[in-house]
Image: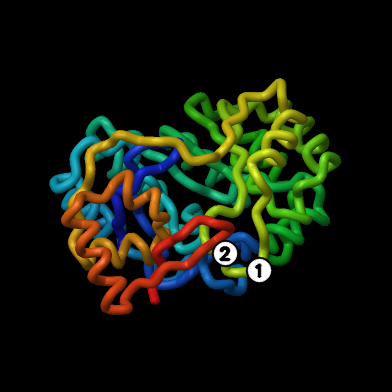
Amino acid sequence: MSKIVFGPITSRRFGQSLGIDLSPDAKQCNFDCIYCELKGATPVNTIQNPPTVKEVISNVKEALLKYKDIDVITLTANGEPTLYPYMKELIKELHVIKNSSKLLILSNGATSTCKETREILKEIDIVKLSLDCVSERCFKKIDRPIKGLHVKDIIEGIKEFRKIYDKELVLEVLVVKGINDKESEFEALRDVLKEIKPDRIDISTVDRPPAYDVQSVGIARLKELASILSSLPISLAYKRDYSEEKRNFTKDEILNMIDKRPQSFDDVKISFSQESIKRLNSLVEANFLHVKDVAGVNFYKLS
C-alpha cells in the first residue's frame, strides 16, 4: 500500500482526483487551522523526511496504470504541500507522465510571499489557494499561522502571483460559525478578491470531521455571505450527484484513502464499486473503521 498516493476520490469541483501526499508520515504545516481534518500540530516551515521525487513518480505511475479517466492529479499533504523541498523537479516530472490529467495543487497560500514559490506554482495547471479572512485578527484566529506570517503579506503575495499566472486560479474561503461568518469580514474580502481577480472563488464550510470543536454554517448563510461577493465568480459547495465510474479498491487502499481524507456515505455511494463497499463494511465490522456524525453527515474514519 502506498503512503504517498491515494484515491482516486470524487471531488465536488475537480472530478476524479488522484491524490499525492507530500508529507505522508505526519502533519507538517505552517498553519494549524481550527477546521483542519488533521489532528492539531505546532506549525512548521519545512517538511522533514519528505519522499523523494523518484518515490513519488514511481507511485503515481503505478496508480495511473490501474486507474483511468483521472481528471486531476492533486498535490496535497498532511499539511502544506508547498513546503515540499523538491517541488520544482517534481512538477517537471509529473508533467511528463500525467497524460490528459491536469495538475492541481491545494495550498493555504502562505508561501506565495516567496518569489521562488510563485515561479514554481505558475507551472501548475490549477492552483487553489485558501483565503479565509483578510483581517489580521480573524486570520490568526481561524488559520493559526506560524509566528511571523501576516495576512497582508500573503494577500500581496497572491496578487503578485496573479500577475504572472495565466492558468486556472481558484481561491477558497472556508466559513466557520462565529469566526469569519460576519458581513464585515466578507465586505473586506470582496475588495481584496476584486483586486486578485481569481477565475473562481469556492465558498464552503466545515463538512468533514475537524480536529477542533468548531461548527459549520448552513447553506442559507453561505448564500447570504456569497451575495456580498455577487459580482465575483462564486461557487458554493454543497452536495450534487455524480455519475462517474465506480472504482474498485482493496482493503489497504480504502484504509489509506480514509486516513488521508474521511469519506462520507455520499462519497462512498458515488465512487465505490459494490465489491469495495463490501470490503469497507467488513473493515467497519472489524473495528478498523468507525462512523462519525458531523452536522448530520456521516463519515467513515479510522478507529
Q: Residue furthest top?
A: 231
Q: Which residue is mark 2?
A: 210
Q: Residues within 10 Å of mark 1 (few under 14, many from 20)?
A: few
Q: Residues within 10 Å of mark 2 (few under 14, many from 20)?
A: some
Near-viewer residue (144 or 243): 243
From this viewpoint, is residue 145 visible? no
The N terminus is located in which quarter? bottom left
Name the image quarter holding residue 101: top left
Residue at 23%, 34% (x, y): give it. Answer: 99
Near-viewer residue (101 or 261): 261
Residue at 26%, 50% (x, y): give it. Answer: 272
Q: Residue 80, which numbered label?
A: none
Helix, strand or loop for disc 1: loop
Q: Residue furthest right?
A: 184
Spatial CA distance of label 2 from label 1 is: 7 Å
Identify which amino acid the numbered label 2 is placed on.
Answer: Pro
275 lies left or right of 293? left
Residue at 67%, 59% (x, y): give it. Answer: 215
Please say if the residues under marks 2 and 1 sit with CB atoms less than 8 Å apart.
yes
Helix, strand or loop for disc 2: loop
73 lies left or right of 23? left
